[in-house]
Image (cartoon, rainbow, N blue to C red):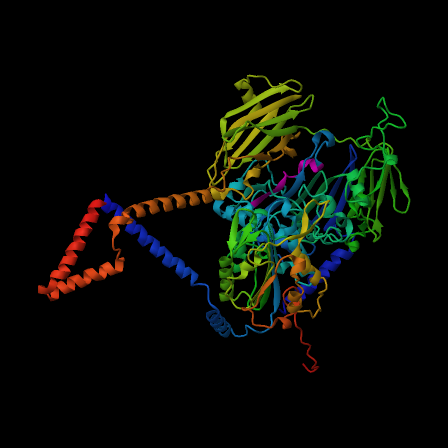
Amino acid sequence: MILLLPKIHILAVCVLCHVSNCAAASSSSYSEHLDLTPLPRNNLLASFNFEVYSDPAAENGFRNDGQLFWAHYGLFPRSVGQIVQSTHTHELHLRFTQGWWDAEEWGLLPHNGKYAGGSGVEVWAWIAGESDTQAENRWYELVNGLSGLFCASLNFVDSTRTTPNPISFRPDSNMRSSFLSYPGSGENNTASSDLHLYHGSLPRETVCTENLTPFLKLLPCKGRAGISSLLDGHRIFDSKWQSMALDFVPICDPDSGCRLHMTQKVDVVLDVQRSLQRQHSPIPHPPPTEELQCDRSKPYHSESICFPLPSPEVVDWKLSDIFGLKIKSSCLVDQTCENEASSSSVCTHITPAWRLSREDGTVVSSTPSNACFSLHDSNEFDLFFSTANSTSVSQNDQPPVYIQRSMTGRGQQNGGIQTIIYNPSMTDSVSLIYLESLPWYMKPYIHTMVATLSSADSAPPASPSTSLEQEVIKRTLYRPFLERVRGTYLELKLEVPPESRLTLSYDFDKTLLYLAEYPPDANRGFDVPPGILTVLTKGADGNISYTYALRTSSLLLSLPTPDFSMPYNVIILTSTVMALAFGTVYNILVRRFVYEDDLGEHTPLLQRIKQRIRARFVKQKTPAGSNKSGKVKERTDAEDRGRDKKT
Amino acid sequence: MNELLKVLSLAFAACLALSSVGVHAQQQMVLDNVTLNQFLSDQLAAREGATGNHANNWAVLVSTSRFWFNYRHLANVLSMYRTVKRLGIPDSQIILMLADDVACNPRNAFPGTVYNNADRALDLYSNNIEVDYRGYEVTVDTLLRVLTDKVDPTTTPRSKRLLTDENSNIFIYLTGHGGNEFLKFQDAEEVSAFDLADAFAQMWETKRYHEILFMIDTCQANTMYSKFYSPNVLAVGSSELDESSYSHHADSDVGVAVIDRFTYYNLEFLERVDKGSELTMKDLIESYDPVKIHSHAGVRTDLYKRNLSEVRITDFFGNVQAVEIDEDDDD
């Protein structure tokens, strides 16, 4: 306790030194950034970017020689740090995505698709472990811990939803093997503790405010100040496409040691008209006649006849209308320096047709295509956008490849998957890796896989040639499914020539599951995770790098669903049949039908038993005087025999 | 042949006799009043200090219905969630289980928003919400495991566990579709009143609660608490046997009913309660009007030894600790 006090004192002083000595700090430990890009048809792409660095290893944290202690978290969130530390995770990537990215209208995915996932929740991590089993157990611990932290059902990522070691992912950190050892692991770091990659996805998972809340709570200002104050669930989840990403990567320098880098990104494509309309009234209403903007190119356009434009071209909106809030002050005002580039900034990517102005009325010059504003004072920030031609947007590069995937076939026994990959480039062919993890109840027949190439405009040829397959599919990595243990893992290395369309198709069988394996809403169907397409580029030095990543949509698989009322029906029917059968048999055995005339004196059963017992006793006692009772007995016996004969 | 049939029928009769004995034994489990009171006083005597004050408050709020037309069940639970948070119970001490997602449902005309009133004045799905169990995770198995803490301690995160101790007051609120001694989970399975009673008994044995307030808003809700036999359980239900519980009103823009009657009138009362309020459970029970609720709300107090007029609302709904100020300056 006594020894700790000076340590804490020193640490506190060091923290203050770090903060006040602006010029000495090479990079601030927290920075936030917002990019605004108008898209065609009055959409707006807003990319939020938050980055936090942990303190360098020289002060505390990781050390290269393998010994570690982690005493001071600072701005780095402790909740994620502890989960990652206890499960020996080196790199963690988590994605929450909803919606569909319209690549033809909007072009490249933000950040080249590196921070966008497939619809639902996607998680992949590099985990240190001496054996596969140990690493896999740590993976399950990791996803369970994340499920508690992010309020998502990540605990459903079990062996049936996990893909080990796909080649579509590469670590961001520059260390390839375990350089970190954690307290309690006993030995120093050794090369024997390898890194295992696990990838899991939950395409059915909804993303809502309960996922955004803990995401914001990881930030230093917790979503109350700075750019993060714009993140409101009511607008983010009213978008055409949104993706929240969390990346946790160790960065190691030979001189300054290792630090942990956490990146949080939120990318949203908002419909400007819809957001503006929500400001007025929450219920969609058509605009009044005087506000209609007409399509003047129509032949019948006149004063009285108006064909409204699909999206108006003369627009005028401000940032607080789109998000419903203004940016309140700056996060961590103390941290930024006057002469350095601010760690909190807003940038726009517009064309000269747009005019920007600030709240106080100052008009920003419209000629530069990127106008940036730094937030380093504690005032509110708002930005006005206006234009007479909203169709003029900054040109986004064409994506290197387009992909779409769909299900074919009919019926409940089998079906097919068809994937169409299109290379729009005129000159270059494109190298791709395509990863598909199918659930175990979808049983593909890989021998039915057919790859056909066609030029962009024509339909695929009827009979594909097998040599073509070898040209296009360079390498196949395939691991078949094991029922109820793991799904199919299929990874293809493809090369698509310029301006051509590649159609991949294969057949699969559907499975009838056990009753307990169906979800409560079984008739909806089952979700198949999206396929992940990664574009490879060969650099000048011959190194291959992963330059672009995109995902298909998830698919809805309708499996044969039993009639869930059948157990009840069977029980009722069986019970009825048993009751009827038993009742009939019992009646046949026991019930006697006697003519009324023959019945005579009906003595009840008890009386007859008593008579017989008395008869036997009387017979034993006085054999001489038994004639009378004997006669009675004989008579009853005779009668009994007579009755027996009748039945 | 005749003999064979006779033997078979005798065997069948013997089976029937044995099973009827079994059924008879089951019925004997329901204790009569005298035995129950004796059992309760034995239990309380064995636990010293069981009648003292509580030290912390927890809440387990469960909505068991799936699908868009059961919006009102989720609005019920979210209203209760908002109330207990307002009165001080932190998120770390609330287990919120929502069987479906309506706020970000594509059918919701107000994305990211859940309303419990047609005037849309209050958004229950604000920017600070933590749902511990959602979607397919909400099952009977999960509920009973959470209550009895029979979870895997290595993989279950702390936010998903009910970490109560013997000084915890727990407010348990269930809503959904139910019937005579059962509550339906997600249209696929049911939890019976016996299961819940046994779960509470296990909680008592393992010293996991000081007092429980059990509130249930379903059809024939009062039957759900008829089988409890653990001490210190106060139960409130929305309707009697063979009575349905009804929704209060619908919002034409949302398109479905937004709140149930019993919960609506509970909330009307609870809106008057703040952290320092002296209102008691007796006031709450007396505020139930069968004419307004359209069903006869019931309360079970035979397991609960304290007088309801001495039990504050904040003993269960809030997180108010009794603080003693030490006036002595010498210490």
Q: Is residue B143 magenta?
A: no
A114 drawn magenta: yes
Image quadrant occupied by the C terminus of chain B: bottom right
Left or right: residue B317 versus residue A135 is right
Q: Check the image and name the residue furthest to the left.
A: A624
Residue A354 visible in the current orientation: no
Q: Is residue B102 left or right of residue A232?
A: left
Mark count: 0
Quadrant of the rendered structure where residue A78 is? bottom right
Q: Position of residue A606 (x, y in %)?
A: 26, 60
Q: Residue B195: x and y, percent?
A: 49, 57
Residue A150 makes an appearance in the image: yes
Find residue B163 and report its image quarter: bottom right
Q: Locate the N terminus of chain B by quadrant.
A: top left
Residue B35, given in percent of the width and then of the height, sits at: 46, 70
Q: Position of residue B140 (x, y in %)?
A: 52, 52
Which range is magenta?
A110-126
| Image quarter of residue B26 | bottom left
- Decide which of A46, A299 is in the foreground and name it: A299
**Vertical side of A640 occupied by A612: above or below:** below
